[in-house]
Amino acid sequence: MYYVSSYRKLSQQERVLIKDKGQEQFVERFKEVIASNALPVKVETILLNAEELLQNISTACNALSRGGNLVVDISWSENKQTKDTFVNATVPYTKIDVSIKPFLDLLDQYLTLRNSSDVTIIFEDSSYIDQTMYYWLNTAEMRLIMSETLNSATIKKLKDIRPTPNNFALFASTQNMNKLVKTAVQEDIVKLPERWNLVFLDFEFHKFNQALVANKPINILNVAMDICCILTDQGNLCDCPTDFNLRQQFFRRVLFLILSSVEEMIAEGIEFPVFDCDEPQPREQIHKVFEDLLASNIENDNLLVYNTSRVSMKTYGYFKVVKNNSINILAKYDDGVVHMLDNNTIKPLRAFYGIGVTHAIPWSYKKPDPVTGELKWTGYCVDFAIEIAERLKFDYEFVEPLQGTFGVKQNGIWNGVVGDLVAGRTDIAVTALIMTADKEEVVDFVAPYFEQTGITIVMRKPVRKTSLFKFMTVLKLEVWFSIVAALIVTGFMVWFLDKYSPYSARNNKKAYPYPCREFTLKESFWFALTSFTPQGGGEAPKALSGRTLVAAYWLFVVLMLATFTANLAAFLTVERMQAPVQSLEQLARQSRINYTVVKNSQTHQYFINMKYAEDILYKMWKELTLNASIDDGRYRVWDYPIKEQYGHILLAINDSIPVESAQEGFDNVNEHLDADYAFIHDSSEIKYAISKNCNLTEVGEVFAEKPYAVAVQQGSHLQDDISKVILLLQKQRYFEGLQEKYWNHSAKGDCPSTDDNEGITLESLGGVFIATLFGLALAMITLAGEVFYYRRKYKEMERQKYFTPQQSNKIVPTISPFYPSEIKPMKVAINPAHFSSKIKADEAWNTSNLILFPKGRNRVTKLN
C-alpha cells in the first residue's frame, strides 16, 4: 500500500495516499494520525492502489501533479520501478515495513541456527501469506511452504507434501494458537515435535495452554515484552494491554516521526511546489532535507531502523522450548545477535528423509521391542539404513508402502517401494530391491551393496528311516526262515552221516586211535551254527560224505554272508542319500515333487517373463519355418531347438497354487517329511531360512542373478552421498559383519550332523548291540537255570542216597578172614546215628560202628 501525501504552503493542501490490497486498517490508522496531528496547513489525502501502479506507472506522476509532496509506502512488495519514479522526482519517499517481519525474523534466525533447509508455515490469517512471501524472497534462503489455517483439506495437503518438510511453524495469536495446536495434535501431524515452532503474534503467550504440548519438545518463539513497553511509552517493565497491536503501534510511531519532520520543514519555510509531469523541476533540496530530518529523529529511537528511505522495526525476542512440562528459555535474540542463556545450546536440526522399506526376511522385518512390546523394523537393510543416516547426519522415518511390496507396474503406474519413490512419499529405498532396467526408468540406483543374488530352490531334507534292527530288514522274513531251516537240516545231516558212515571217527577207531570230535546231535547243530562265524565251525567230520556236506554248507555260508554284508551296506547308504533333484531342469522333468513360488513376487514374474519369451521365440521360429519364400531345408531339424521348460514350470506352479508369503512357502516345505515339495524363491531369503531351520536344504545352483541396490528419487543429491558411504563401508568390511550377523549366527550349531563322511549312527546298528545284550541275558538266564537244576538234582541224589531204603537184595560181602562169624554183614546203605540217638535192637545191625564211635578204629565184636 502506498500513501502519497501532499504538503503545500497553500490555503488547501492535498495528500496522495497509495494503498495496497488488505491494508484498510492501516488507512484508518493513517487518517487518524493525520487528523490528530495539528499541521499549519490543511491536508487532503489521495489513495492509490499499488497494483494499479504496477500496471501503469503514469498513475504516480498524475498523483504528484495533483499536489502530492510526500510518499509513504507501506506495501508488502518492493516495487523498484515505483520507488525510482518518486526518487527521480525528488519527492520525499519513505518505505514503512508494517508486515510481520519481526516474527519472521525470529523464525528465520532460529531455523538458521538449526541449519534448516525448509519450513512449512501455517497462518491464522491468509493476509499474512503475501507479507511472508515478499519477506522470504528478499531475505531467507530456505525453501518455504505456506498454508492457510488448519482444516481437513489443509491437513490432508500437509500430509501429502513430498518431500516431507523438515520444519513446521504456526503463526497465530495466543487464542488461535491453542486452537491450531489442538487440531494438529488431534490429527496426528505432530509426529516430530522438535521440528514444530510456535510463533506468537501477540503478548498474551503466557496464557498458552501448555497441556497441549505436554512431553513434546516443541519450540516457542515470541517477541520481547519490552517492545510493547517502548511503543506504549511505559518504560521497561509494564503490563501490555490486551488489545495491543504491534504493527499498528509501530506504524503510528513512524507516522508521528514523519509528520514531525514535515512540521520542521514547514517551520523553516521550505515550500513544496507542485510536480509537473511534463516539465519536472529539480527539488533535490526538499528530498535531502526530509531524509536528514527523518534520519535524525529515528536515530534517537532505539526501536526503529532507517536505511535508504526504509523504516523498519528492530526485533527483540526469545527462543524457548518445552521440556519436562515447562517452558525453558534457550536464548535471547537482540536484532541479529543471539545470547545463549544458562549455558544452553541450540542443536542443529538434521535433515529428515523418509526411507522406504517392506517386509523381507532377513532384510527388513518387524520385531517386537523386548521392553515396550512395540513392533519395530529390524534386519540387514534396517541396520544399513541406520548406518547411512549416522554417517550423513540426517533423521529418518521408515515408510512401508500402502500397496504392494517392492513395486510392480500396473496400468503404467508403479506401486510398492518404487511407487513411493516416484510419488515422492519417500526419499530413499533401502530394502531388498533388485536393480532392473524397468525400475531405472523411474528411479536412480546407487552402487550395489550386496553380492549377486538370484533365485534358488529349497526342499526339506529327507527324513532318514532309521531302525534299531536295520540289519534284520536286509533280508526278507522268508530268507531268514530258509537260513534257519538250512542250519537245522545241515546239523541233522552231519550227525546222521557221522553216525552211520563206516569211515567216521566213531565207527573207525583203528584209523583214528587218537581222540577225535564226536558229532553227536547237539555237537552237529553247534558245528552248523558256528560255521557262520569268521572263526569257523571247528574240526570237520572225518568221513568223506560228511566233509562233502560241510564243504557245500560252507559255500552256502560264504555266499549268504557276502549277500548280507552287501545289502546291509546298501541299506545304510540309502539313509544318507541326497535330495532327489539337483537342478531346476531336473525339477521340471519330474512329476513327483510339487513346487511353487510366492504369488506376484519377483520370482513369479521371472517365470512369467521366461514363458512369454519362449512363446515369442516359438512364434518367430514357426513363422520362419512356415514361410513359403524360404527354403524349408534350412530349418529341418530332428530336435525342437526351443525348450518349453519354463512353460511347463509355470503350469506346475499354477497347479500347486502360489503361496501368499515366503513364510507360508517355507512352512509348506517343512511339513512335507518325504521331501516331495519344493519352494522356488530369492536365494538370500532361502539361505537365511536354511540357517534357522535344520530341516531345510538348498537344491541346485543360483540362477537369474541380479544385484541389490539402494534407490533414490531421480536427480536426487543423495545418490552421490550414499555412493560414497557405500564405498567407504565396503572398504571397512562393514557388510561382511552384517552378513555374519544375519546369516552365520544361526541355529546351525544345534542341528544334528548329517555329514556323509561320518560313520554309521547307533540308531541304525543299535539292534546289533541289543541282540548281543539279549544273548548275554539269555546266557545268564541259562546259567541260573543250570545252577538251579544242578542243585536240585544233587539234593535229590543225596536224599535218595541216605534216606531212601535199599530196595536191592544184594548184600555187601563180608571179609571172612577179618571178622568173626557172629558179626552180621552190613548193607551198603547205612543210616547215620549220634551218641544221643536210641537205636532199636532190630536196627543195630544196620548201624556203622564208625559212626557211633568216630574216634575208634578197633573192631566191634559184640553189640548189645
Image (spheres, rainbow, N blue to C red):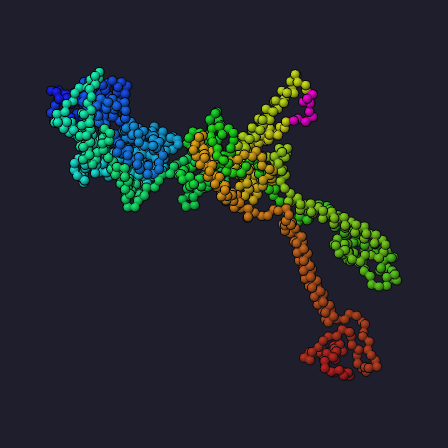
From the viewer's perspective, is residue 58 above or below residue 116?
above
- Is 17 left, or right, of 568 in this rendering? left
* Residue 127 position within the rendered picture, expressed as x and y whole percent measured from the top left: 27, 27
From the viewer's perspective, is residue 761 above or below residue 60?
below
Range of residues picked out in magenta: 633-641
Residue 285 is covered by the magenta coloring: no
Residue at position x 59%, y 35% in the image? 594
From the viewer's perspective, is residue 588 above or below residue 50?
below
- Is 648 left, or right, of 228 in this rendering? right
Most common SS among magenta residues: loop
* Residue 663 position within the rendered picture, expressed as x and y whole percent measured from the top left: 52, 38
Residue at position x 21%, y 18% in the image? 280
From the viewer's perspective, is residue 750 above or below residue 253?
below
- Is residue 118 in sight in this rendering? yes
Residue at position x 68%, y 56% in the image? 775
- Is residue 842 in sight in this rendering? no
694 or 190: which is nearer to us? 190
| Quadrant placement of the C terminus | bottom right
Residue 639 is covered by the magenta coloring: yes
- Is 11 left, or right, of 731 in this rendering? left
* Residue 309 position within the rendered picture, expressed as x and y whole percent measured from the top left: 23, 28
* Residue 752 position within the rendered picture, expressed as x and y whole percent measured from the top left: 58, 48
| Quadrant placement of the N terminus | top left
Residue at position x 46%, y 41% in the image? 383
